[in-house]
Each structure stands twice: as C-alpha cells, then as structure tokens.
Image: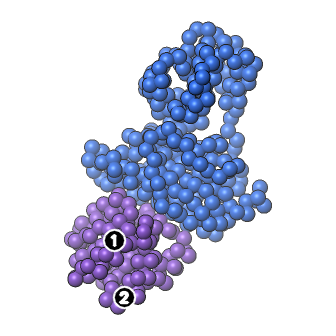
Chain colours: A blue, B purple
Amino acid sequence: MSKILVNDCDNPTINAITNFMSSKAEIINRPFSRDLDITEFDMVLLGADGDRETILDKLKHIRYGARFRNIPILLLNPKKSRDQKQFPFLTGAASILSIEEPPEALAQMLQGYLMPSRQPKKFEMEYLTPFIESTKQVFSTMGSMTTNYKGVYFKNDYNLLGDVSGIIGLSGNAEGMVVITFYWDLAQKIISSIMGVEEEEISPELINDGVGELINMISGAAKRYLSESPYLFQLSLPTVFVGWQHEIGHPEKASVAVLMFDIEEKSFAIQVSLTAKDQQNRR
Amino acid sequence: MKVIVADDSMLTRKIVIKYLAPLNFEAIEASNGSEVMEILNKEENLPNLILMDWNMPEMDGIEVLEEIQKNARLNRVPVIMLTSESDELSIETAMKAGARAYITKPFTAEQLVETIKETIR
C-alpha cells in the first residue's frame, strides 16, 4: 500500500483526504519538520494555508528530504486560490490542489500522482547505462569518492530539482540534454574533495564552475561508451543554473530519465533526455 | 619550464596546476583558445608545453592546434590535449591536427605527469 505524508493540514482536510484515499494509501499525519527524511513515502501533501515565504521554506526542506526520489509534493489549499496555477511552478511543488474540488476529481488526481514510474525500456538502458558508469568513473577518478546508483524514474518536464545544476546540450546522431543537479552541501563537499582542501576554502564561483565541468566530464566519458551506437553525440559547452525554481525546455515528446545516486548518504541526480535520430525504428 | 594550462573550467585549471606542482613548472592560465594564441604571440620565450582542452568558447582547442601548426615559430611547442572528448574519432582528429599526446577526462595526477614526461623527454 502507498504511504502519503500529510504535513500541516487542518482536521477537515485530513478527514477528507482519509475518506478519499484510505482504501488506496496509508495516510500519515505529521507536523512539518525541517530535517525529515521522506524517502519512505510515496507522496507528500503540504497544507498551503499560509504566507508564500513560509510555504516556500517548507517546500525547500521537504525537497531536501525527498533526496531526488520520485515523490510528488502537492500543496493542499483549503480554498480555491486565484494564483492556483502559477504557484506550484514557482515553488517546485508538483501541483496545488484545493479541498473544494469535487471529491471524486480530487481522489482521481491524487491516485494519478501515486502511479509508479514506468520501467526503462531496453533501448533506453542502452544510453542510460553509459551515463551511470561514467558518473561512477568521474567521481572515483577525480575525487576518490564511491558513488552508489539508486535507480531511475521518468518524468515529462525538466524542472531542476537541486540548488545547483550543470547542463550540457548534446547534438549529432543523437540529440538531447544532460543535467547534473545537487543540493549545495554535496556540491561543496565534492569540489573540496576533488581539490583536496577544506570545504570552507571552496568559493561559490568554483562550485558553480566545477558542477559544469563535472557534467562535461560525465557526458564525455559516456560518449566513449556510445561511440559505436546510434547514440553518438557532440558535446556543447556546459551552462550552470543556481537555484531550484527553474524549468528548462527539452524536445517535445522526449521523456526525461532521472538517475538517482548517493555519495556517503547524500544524494544527487542526473537527468538524461536523449533521442537517436533513428530511434523511431528501434522502439 | 613554462606550461600554458588552457581550459574554460577554472576547476580543471586549478587541478592541473596542483598536479604539476612536483614538476616545478611555471603555469600560465588561459580560459579559451584566443587567450592561448595571445600568450604565444606575445611571449618572447615560448612555453615548453601547452596543456589544452578541446571545447572552449571563442576558439576551440583544434582551431588553436591548426594555427600553431601553420606557424613555424610556434609549431615546435608540444601540445597535449586534455579533454572530455573521449571517442576514437576525436583522438584521431586531434593527433592529425598536431597534438603530441591525448589525455581524456577524468584523469589522475599520475596519468598527467607520466604523459608530460613522455612528451617533453
């Protein structure tokens, strides 16, 4: 059975959610906590009855607790709000729902978010496996760090999930984009480990530059594995985004694979969207 | 001994300079190919070695190699490519363009130092 964490919702909302979903999921009601690891849950519902800054701060900490896992974070409004559509995008939440929605519609929406991500197809693992291997190789060679691959899921957008993200465009026989995304503390730890100095000695400028160089190295190393395949690509220069309220464009219909990794109990993700020009024949 | 370290990544330039420390080289940093050409055209005493990335803004590593090969004064300076471009075709392209050696990223201090020693022997 799925597990839904309900944070900071009033009693009528909790009762309504329990009525809609109790046969589908276990509802766990807890007050918001900054350091909560939410990876045991399949969804988080956060009460959105408060000022925007407070909700943003809570969402930030829930996002850290999600550790790049496929856990939709939904805001629940007691009433329909006029900025209902814009708010989730700005905050990184998957959506904002109102308890005033018809119960059947709300239950259906929640169940939709609980649908498990599909498994990767064989042709997708052909190009994802080189990125998994090259990621391990880059951290091991440059920073003597062991990287544990934790799995893959798919999404349809390119929301940047971390605090700092390096992006590289791919073109040629295969086209797409690869993104590495970190929470700030792990990015700092990795760059200091590569440089062999204390974390305090690493400037934000060097972290930003380093995140770009890491995705450049990972993509370049993956290219070697793919040189005999239909997925051979050319690298562009990397770009770095700081902040998590960004969405970047990606080819229409191309799904985005999120590869999840841990280094010493801290998480990061690599998002890969890659389409070979002859892919239509390969499905 | 003087070496130009050309890479648009500040992190990679710093790592390379750190790895070069035991060799007591004087390192001159460049963040793109145009800067490499400026340094080469300005310096009376040419560097003993150029360590250069491929993908850089303004002028990439292969364009610099081609410029160096065309110039009788500059083409004695050995160039080692240090790049993420790791496939066989890229390596062949760079060696044909005049690179003396090729190191793919990620790289270790040992790989870098050994390749440099073999190249400037």
Numbered tag placed on residue B106 in the rendering = none
Q: Is residue A64 above or below residue A77?
A: below
Q: Mark 1 points at which residue?
A: B35
The quarter in which the N terminus of chain B is drawn is bottom left
* Residue at 22% across, 83% down: B44
Q: Say whether residue A219 is visible.
A: yes
The crowd level at tag 1 (other Cα within 10 Å; few <14, some 14-19, many 20+) is some
- Residue B79, position in %: x, y? 37, 79
In which image quadrant can residue A226 be found? Answer: bottom right
Numbered tag placed on residue B71 in the rendering = 2
Type of the residue with mark 1 = Glu
* Residue at 64% across, 69% down: A228
Mark 1 falls within which chain? B
Q: Is residue A200 above or below residue A228?
A: above
Task: Give the residue furthest to the bottom.
Answer: B72
Q: Which of marks 2 and 1 is nearer the N terminus?
A: 1
Name the element at disc 2.
Answer: loop
Q: Is residue A244 above or below residue A178?
A: above
Mark 2 falls within which chain? B
Residue A127 as seen in the image, left or right of residue A205: right
Name the element at disc 1.
Answer: helix
